[in-house]
Image (spheres, grey):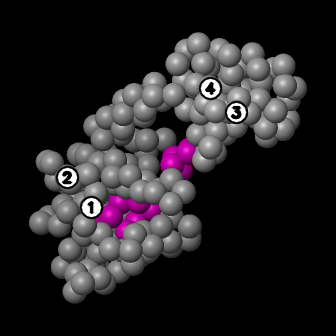
Amino acid sequence: MTAENSQTLDRGLRVLSCVAESADGLTVTELAADLGVGRSVVHRLVVTLVQRGLLRKSTGSRYVCAPTLAALGRAATRTVRAEVTPALRRLSDGSAAHFIAFDSDEIALLASSDTHPEPRMAAGPDLLAAARRACSTAEDSVVVIEGGLTHVAAPVRGVVGLEGVVLVLGVSDPETVLPKILRAVDEISRALA
């Protein structure tokens, strides 16, 4: 950590990240072990985060994310959507273009070229697996044929804390559209970095 960073703020954010990644919440002891700091330090951080409405105490002295974090997440999604949607709309020549993010076993549709996208895309498991594979490989894109339609997934790289792809559904000619997709991905990466 550089001299310009706040150690306390950093630790508090790490507490939030650890709790958010846990399925059943964490105790102060578990958090202290995860962070490599004393229980008293973690206790002070947790008390502050509870007072600010970011964590709440659950059963068995476990701390879980509080609803305030959902509101912060919605605000962040609105910001992402505003920054990403123009690139998606320029990209979609009759095809639906989406920006999706992965979090463990879940996907989230963050932005779409459609004015009113469905909360869940009509994408099959093969397509979603290929989109996730695009994030974990060095490839620029993955082309998938599913249900007689051709789709292209291209990973958005260089955005801290985000594993996401631009997914274009129903592409008629992948070779022609791929350069446009890669330009859109680059634009989105720069906008979100």
**Residue 89 in the image: x percent, y percent?**
19, 52
Q: Which residue is label 2 attached to? A: 117
Upstream in sequence: badge 4 or badge 2? 4
- In the image, what residue type sits under mark 2? Pro
Judging by the rendered image, the residue that carries numbered circle 4 is 57
Looking at the picture, does residue 109 appear above or below residue 178? above
Of label 2 and label 3, which has the lower sequence position? 3
Mark 3 or mark 1, whichever is nearer to me: 3
Mark closer to the chain start, 3 or 1: 3
Q: Which mark is residue 121?
A: 1
Residue 59 at what x, y percent from top left? 64, 33
Q: Quadrant of residue 3?
A: top right
Highlighted range, magenta: 153-168
Q: Calculate the distance from the C-alpha at mark 2 to the C-alpha at mark 3.
A: 40 Å
- Marks 2 and 1 in Cβ contact (< 8 Å): yes
Graded by Cα atoms within 10 Å as few (under 14), some (14 to 19) or many (20 or more), the crowding at tag 3 reads few
Secondary structure of residue under mark 1: loop
Crowd rating for badge 2 (residues with CA inside 10 Å; few <14, some 14–19, many 20+): some
User: Gap in Å between the C-alphas at discs 2 and 1?
Assistant: 8 Å
